[in-house]
Image (cartoon, rainbow, N blue to C red):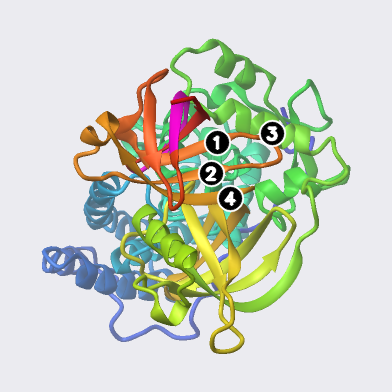
Amino acid sequence: MVNGPSSQPNPGSFAIPAANIASHPDVIRNVRELQRWIDSLPLANPAKAGNQLLHQLRLLTRDPQPGSRFGALLDMYDAPLEQLLMIVNERLPGSPDSALPLDQLESLLVELLTELACGHLRIANQLLASGKVPATETLFRAMRLLDSALNIERLHYRRLALHRWQLMVSIFLRAEYQQVADQQVDPKLQNEDEPGTIQGLYFRTLLISLCDPHQKIPSEVTAWHRWTTEHTGLLSITLLPQGAFAIPIDFGGKLSPLDSARRSGPGTDTRYLDGDRFMQQLQEDPSAPAGLRQALIGLIKGRQTPEQRQTERQPRNHPYQLIYGLRNIHRRLEELTRGSTPSRSEVRPVPCKQVNQSRFGAAFQLRGPLSPPLNIGEPVLAEAEASSSGAAPVGFAARIRRVFSGEDQQIEIGVEKIQGRLIPATIVGSAAERTRGDNLALLQHSADTGKYILLASRSIYREGDSVAAEGPSMRYNLRMLRLGGIVQHTAYIDVEPIDG
């Protein structure tokens, strides 16, 4: 373990926003006055209350002379922030698997959590400037606030905010330098679903970020988050790689965890995450979340090959139309089968821009909000905008593999091209009765491998049973072999043709 001032240099002060030149006339520096002001907040209108809180908190944390009661004033923001955080957390289970962008309240809350963390780090900087060391509790409070902000963004597919991650790295290094990273804090300072140490909070965020959460559904990431909370003690940082599961980590703060794991080499800012015991527990624990161990193994194996991608991405800047949702794709494929042009289509596609492509995939940028929202794993049709009237549609079918959300409802998706044909079909016969009218399907056929995959309502799946599907020109009798995955109510079912 990297420990103590004897083994690493003093990390210095924290890089937080500078104080204002002069005090603002509206800043509240009196404890009783601030309490009355907080009590008057319109919490029945969370977004309005959040805006008012952020404005007043920012005036305080950046005031040139916040006064001797600065810490007590910061503590008073905990209660209203917890109320807003509770409102946001209650919303998440409503759409656990959808790529929903941050709404106004969630964006405000992320800024509030970050600003309050910077307030505590300002106290730490004041102590460091006077030759004293910050209290463990001060560092822990800042760390958990940043952790909460990053977790909200993660569950909405936001890219890792590098400035917040850099602050978390700085807090961890400071705690290591003071030899308090693994010191348990007062349980009153933590929630039940949080590690009780600075080291635990750092390791949890680090590990989830390494697993590339942008290609997983939020409910799966939440399960990883929950299990990792109880097992951060199995992780450690080493100066040199040790064991089979050593992952390079950048302590310079310039790279995200995933970038550092893929690109870092030996150097003064590189340390290694020792994950052997963690991986062993993942393998032995029957309650361990599915996919977490495989995600880490994929990351480690990826570093052993010279190229992580099968083919290089080529930059593009082409207008496209995106169609998603099984019913819409089915309808559009039927139109193409009949020779219809996009101008006469009954489907309203989403305008987007292709920003890169490779042999097996592509990336698109589009603007939300989308209703319904996108989901990892769902199929899409991407059609290039016709260069002239009456031109034949050009495009491809794909599955969404990665989602990023950005400012102003911007969304970027990475897709994997579907190999072979995608045939619109209708489920008929006895299986259709189980669909309750949801009998539209897509049949994927790869001529190279001979494999068939049926995309249909989850309710039709019965392992070993047969299902009949009628396409535009023929009827398919299929045996259902195994369930390949579920996206919302649509199942990917491996099937094989049967006679009769």
Q: CA distance from mark 3 to mark 4?
A: 29 Å
Residue tagged 4: 421
The numbered disc on residue 298 is: 3
Q: Amino acid at mark 1?
A: Tyr
Residue contact at pointers 1 and 4, CB within 8 angstroms: no
Badge nearest the viewer, 3 or 1: 1
Q: Crowding at label 1, few (<14), some or many (≥20) Cα neighbours within 10 Å? A: many
How far separated are the C-alphas under marks 1 and 4? 10 Å
Q: Is residue 360 left or right of residue 25?
A: right
Q: Which mark is residue 452?
A: 1
* Looking at the image, residue 252 lies above or below residue 303: below
Magenta run includes residue 479: yes
Marks counted in the figure total 4
Q: Which residues are magenta?
A: 476-488
The residue pinned by badge 2 equals 444
Q: How many residues crowd mark 2 within 10 Å: few (<14), some (14–19), many (20+)?
A: many
Pointer 1 with pointer 2, Cβ within 8 A: yes
Cβ–Cβ below 8 Å for labels 3 and 1? no
Element at label 4: strand
